[in-house]
Image (spheres, rainbow, N blue to C red):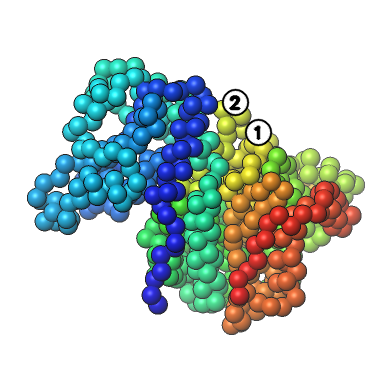
Amino acid sequence: MVYVEPDIDYAAMHRECRAKVFAGMKEAGVTSGVALLKGGEPSFRHDTDHEHLFRQESHFFYLFGINEPDLYGLLDFSTGLSHVFIPRLDIDYEIWCGKIVPPSGYAQRYGIDCVHFVDELTEVLKVLGGPIHILSGINSDSKREIVKVDVQSLIDTEVIDAVLYRVMVESRAIKSGLELDLMRYVNNFASKAHINVMQNCKPGLMEFQLESLFLHYASFEGGSRYSAYTCICGCGPNGAVLHYGHAGAPNSGRIKDGDMCLLDMGAEYHCYASDITCSYPSNGKFTQKQKGIYNAVLDALLAVREAVKEGVEWVEMHLLAERMIVKGLVAEGIVLLGDKTLDQVLDLEIGALFFPHGLGHLMGMDTHDVGGYPQGISRHSRPGLSSLRLNRPLKAGMVLTNEPGCYFIEALLVPALDDPVKGPHLNRDLILGDYANFGGVRLEEDLIITVDGCENMTDVPRTVEDIEAVMSGQAWPSPDAATEKLWTRTTIKTQTLVKDGDVIKKSSVTTNVVYTPKV
């Protein structure tokens, strides 16, 4: 196969990103001075000379689009010009790493207005004058503080660290048209990579072989040299480990016949991520118990997809997903209502025992992208909601994941069985018996929020019937009725949806978004 690069003008895309930051800073009252950013540095394996594959710091890449180490970037608020500073390399670099690109080459390739050498940075700062704005803030997911540029080692001048980070975060949270085109491309080949794994999954394989199939397809077919995150390939009881696949549990289990496989894998291209999860039985045939749990999660996925639009509070979407999952567990006899209503059981925080993570997160240059908690917004304390990576009204142009899940996690369920409040509403025999080694089901798709709905960029089989057909060798997309029904529901964005007597949403009908599988 001949690889064809997506037709995207990256220089234009990053010019748009810079324009958004210029506009945001102006709106914040900044019309003079400069913003100074430092790019990433090379990293090595401990004390060796083994150099890791470099990946640029995301804020820097957002503005300048250059995936090389040891750079500085600058925005001049007086003129609206961009500056990049590159290392002054010597002949040793050319011998070991190839031809040295001159400043004019960077300017032409990346659409940068002015390119200088790093050793000229201090002089340029003196000439431009004014205060220097730098990034300063704490990532709401990692709780890690961004490394500040050491301006005082370069020049003695006023440093302002209270504005730029907030403007950058809000700019990155709303994607431009070109960014969305890029993310559609990443989702397209990542979806196909998942289907490739689905069609080759079988009992007897190792979990890491499924990871390998995904990574190879994404690289060979999509041009992805980076994984968006460590692949999660939890099969059987390993599917109940939310972030399985780390060094202590490295996708090293052997897949058994009938195992439910939870595969959370995403590719990255031009520093933009995809994040997709599929769940299905290793042998391609759902048991009745697997169907029950799977369909509860699928109902949650579809209910959220149909309810989201600009202005919707993400917390409400999490509660909607939780409701659908618990309702499905009631139908399976795992959660017991007793003398209570469904709402009363939900008030007991039963849902978080099976769905302990947040419904989804913003996504862009990072899988867990910035912008989930704007200034002044704090986390909820309620179980489940406390794990949300996003707590704000949705805006058109945001990209986020919709990823409900249901898991049988011993550390959560066993203590709850003996809880005097929760225990009576849990079926001890089923939880400790038939479902003890079930693992979990998670379904994840990547949505673009629109004014009155969403666009689902992820194209993988979702119904039980479609999954079984694809795993038996049928091509995707499938023309059968189940597929048509699923994708028709995707394109109807705001409609009264009544399911088993519950009104999930009441609004008007629109066809603003037209995203259907391509044959």
Label 2 CA crowd tier, 10 Å (few <14, some 14–19, many 20+) = few
- Residue 71: x and y in percent read 27, 40
- Residue 70: x and y in percent read 25, 41
| Pointer 2 with pointer 1, Cβ within 8 A | no
Kind of residue at badge 2: Gly
Does the image show residue 147? Answer: no
Residue furthest to the left in view is 91
- Residue 125: x and y in percent read 27, 25
Label 1 CA crowd tier, 10 Å (few <14, some 14–19, many 20+) = few
Structural distance between the alpha carbons of marks 2 and 1: 13 Å
> In the rendered image, which residue does mark 2 sit on?
376
> In the rendered image, which residue does mark 1 sit on?
380
Q: Is residue 43 left or right of residue 262?
A: left
Closer mark to the observer between disc 2 and disc 1:
2
Question: What residue lies at 57% left-to-right and 32% top-to-bottom?
Answer: 374
Question: What residue lies at 37% left-to-right and 40% top-to-bottom?
Answer: 60
Question: What residue lies at 37% left-to-right and 29% top-to-bottom?
Answer: 79
